[in-house]
Amino acid sequence: MKREELVKQIKSKESYLCIGLDTDLKKIPASLQKFEDPIFEFNKRIIDATHEYCVAYKPNIAFYEAMGSKGWDSLEKTLEYIPKEIFTIADAKRGDIGNTSGLYARAFFDNMNFGSVTVAPYMGEDSVTPFLEFKDKWVILLALTSNSGSKDFQMMKLENGQYLYQEVLEKSSKWGNASNLMYVVGATQATLLKDIRKIIPDHFLLVPGVGAQGGSLEEVSQNGMNKDCGLLVNASRSIIYASSGDDFNTKAKEEAIKLRDEMKVYLSKYL
Amino acid sequence: MKREELVKQIKSKESYLCIGLDTDLKKIPASLQKFEDPIFEFNKRIIDATHEYCVAYKPNIAFYEAMGSKGWDSLEKTLEYIPKEIFTIADAKRGDIGNTSGLYARAFFDNMNFGSVTVAPYMGEDSVTPFLEFKDKWVILLALTSNSGSKDFQMMKLENGQYLYQEVLEKSSKWGNASNLMYVVGATQATLLKDIRKIIPDHFLLVPGVGAQGGSLEEVSQNGMNKDCGLLVNASRSIIYASSGDDFNTKAKEEAIKLRDEMKVYLSKYL
């Protein structure tokens, strides 16, 4: 997807909501277990109920991989079902030497037609660039994550005075551009978003950690928004598991609308 | 697999060879394409020809993932076919927030019974520990990789005077122990192995980059061996694609024997 299309979608839907499809067989209603593919059935109903209020879906690949080749089938069907105008993120956190990263790129971009994939930066430039070679596809590079372990290395000070995550932003921003590269910045790090915007004013940020992990949507929006919005804020569990009963899809819709309504306010306030 | 079993195998086979199963449909002999599962057929013949000379097999997960659910089936069959006394490595380079890493662990350890999985350290402690909770399973953490991009972040100097990869070794070695945690150190970095051994004298190292990527086996062995050998040296393409013809398995066997014979010498010289 081209950047313009994504921005257009955000403006017309008045939303920068990304919904995480972290679909777990143990957490979906028992009534779905009778279907041939309960995971797909759950995703289908979530997508039907929420697609008007979000601009992106983000399946967390681990949930599908944990089910072996069956999970892979559910993922493929889910991806085909997502309306074409919606941005898709393979949350896979891949990254390997060049020829191997190229294969991961093929898996997510060619075989499955994902719009983007999350990538880990530790192995450096040649582990990232193979993903950038696909037209109108995006790399979403881990910069500053929302978990407690982000302190261990990402927040270490380098000899040059920068934190490691700042070095990741600075160096990697030259490997691609604001039309094929985004960054993961956790909502739990919202106070740092202003500093991050000094390094990468134009790039989109994928922001997990609002809701279940405790980040504030207003703080993220105020500190992180740029002239094109530049944010995709993800919510997973708080939407898809808003109810554990058969009304899971209507409850998911309510939660999505609630977040969209909040985003509408911030778009008019901070954009 | 317990550490004692791995060490015992190394001593009895006089080998610390790991064979990378980077199996690519485009590179295997045309005569195999008539089989229902050409990838598995290729792996089966490679395993039959080489299992006496190596102590580990390392399927590179990207090669299987690039083929979708079919590739996943080939991987599962391959893993079941590997003799039980041989160590297995899912070269997946995963790593995510805690609950997600737990799912990746389940995918590789429970569903597929791999002995170990490679993990990227960028997201810190809580992204690694879920993999360490499985009995007799191993994490192989990326420390210093063999690719050119290893310079970008791994070799950056921190404020405390250490390189990032040294910090990764030091900090992470406290998350597990030498019986459930190994490290990836590329053969192209062999001169640094002596320094690495000062930080982690006891841990096993998985060393890629000998052969196709130009690392020297003698240098790696001389600088990296500890009292239990402590090395798994990987070769992929130089063995499995030693011939592109129907004699690929006999040629693979010859290459494996050649490396085993070299290792035999180094085991008596440096152990």
Image: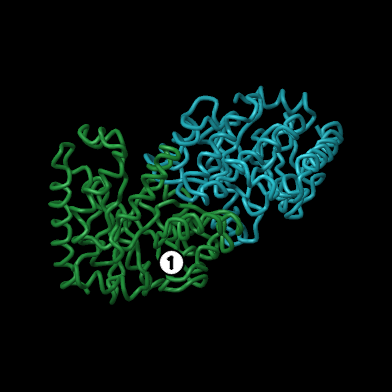
Chain colours: A cyan, B green
Q: Amino acid at mark 1?
A: Lys
Which residue, given by chain and number where applicable, does mark 1 sit on? B137
Q: Is residue B90 visible?
A: yes
Query: Which residue is pictured at 27% across the width and 71% down the height?
Result: B229
Percent across and percent down for residue A94 are 49, 45
Instruction: Give the quadrant of residue A130.
Output: top left
Query: Which residue is pictured at 79% across the width and 49% down the height?
Result: A216
Query: Which residue is pictured at 63% across the width and 45% down the height?
Result: A34
Percent across and percent down for residue A245 are 77, 49
Q: Is residue A161 visible?
A: no
Q: Is residue A109 left or right of residue A32?
A: left
Q: Is residue B199 left or right of residue B159?
A: left
Nearer to us in this view, B85 or B187: B85
Percent across and percent down for residue A234 are 70, 43
Q: Is residue B12 left or right of residue A54?
A: left
Residue A85 vertical position relative to residue B193 in the rendered view, above or below: above
Protein chain holding label 1: B
Nearer to us in this view, A188 or B162: A188
Query: Which image quarter holds the N terminus of chain B?
Result: bottom left
